[in-house]
Image (cartoon, rainbow, N blue to C red):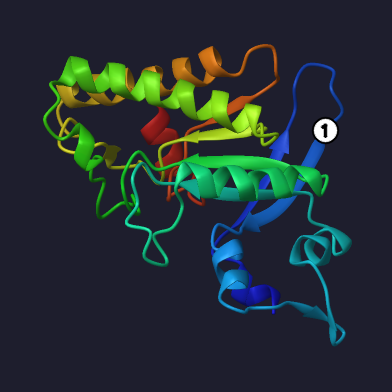
Amino acid sequence: MIHKLLAACFVLVSLAGAEERAFFKGGDISLLQTIEDHGGVYRENGEIKDPLMIFKDNGCNAMRIRLFHTPSGIPPRVNSLEYTKRLGRRIKDAGLKLMLDIHYSDTWADPGKQHKPAAWEPLSFDELVEAVLVYTKEVIVEMCAAGAAPDWVQVGNEIAPGMLWPDGRIGTPEQWEKLATLLKAGIAGVQAGRGDRPMKTIIHLHCGGSSKQTARYVD
């Protein structure tokens, strides 16, 4: 049943100063609560178990969940902030690390589409930058207050072609600068919302499996 639960797998290796090297293994379980609400159950050796415990007992120590700005609520577009807080709290209570994937969209953001939230459509670029910062800060504050403080925060999802199109779509040097400005706003929002909690930010590319493409992008 585990393969049905995993929408995406991730592996993280962390090395900070003299800190011991840590290996993180997990998956994206953003639809878990919806699956269970519709009667889905998970078994190990025929026994119904909490899927988080199945993952944990089999070597996983981290989980990712996505966040949409204003999703329709029609499955699978269910990942509102309230939904994400509840699922995030469940992950943390299970003793797992939490990665929060902020899509900055009302639906999936990926290499083929990076639609800004409908509520942000009328905004000028400067207003959009401010909205990203304020929204991100509010999200982090609420997640922390709900007992679901993320260990890592993805600022955008699969943003190799940019984010929040058309404003942050890459191409010209000016557009790259706009993307950088939006990313900085998101990162600043995380820093403003986390207080004194340790929390890292992630730039998420769909081409992460290619060192050449990734180096080119970051350069």
Horizontally, is 34 left or right of 170 in the view?
A: right
The picture places residue 53, in percent across and down from the top left corner, at 83, 62
Residue 175 placement: quadrant: top left
Q: Is residue 169 visible?
A: no
**Residue at left offset 73%, top offset 77%:** 42
Is 8 located above or below residue 13 in the figure?
below
Is 71 located above or below residue 140 in the figure?
below
Is 15 located above or below residue 37 in the figure?
above
The picture places residue 46, in percent across and down from the top left corner, at 85, 87
**Residue at left offset 50%, top offset 48%:** 66
Horizontally, is 132 left or right of 81 in the view?
A: left
The picture places residue 73, in percent across and down from the top left corner, at 38, 59
The picture places residue 47, in percent across and down from the top left corner, at 86, 82
Amino acid at dot 1: Arg
Relative to the observer, which residue lies in front, 105 or 145? 145
**Residue at left offset 40%, top offset 46%:** 68
Relative to the observer, which residue lies in front, 76 or 203? 76
The residue identified by callout 1 is 21
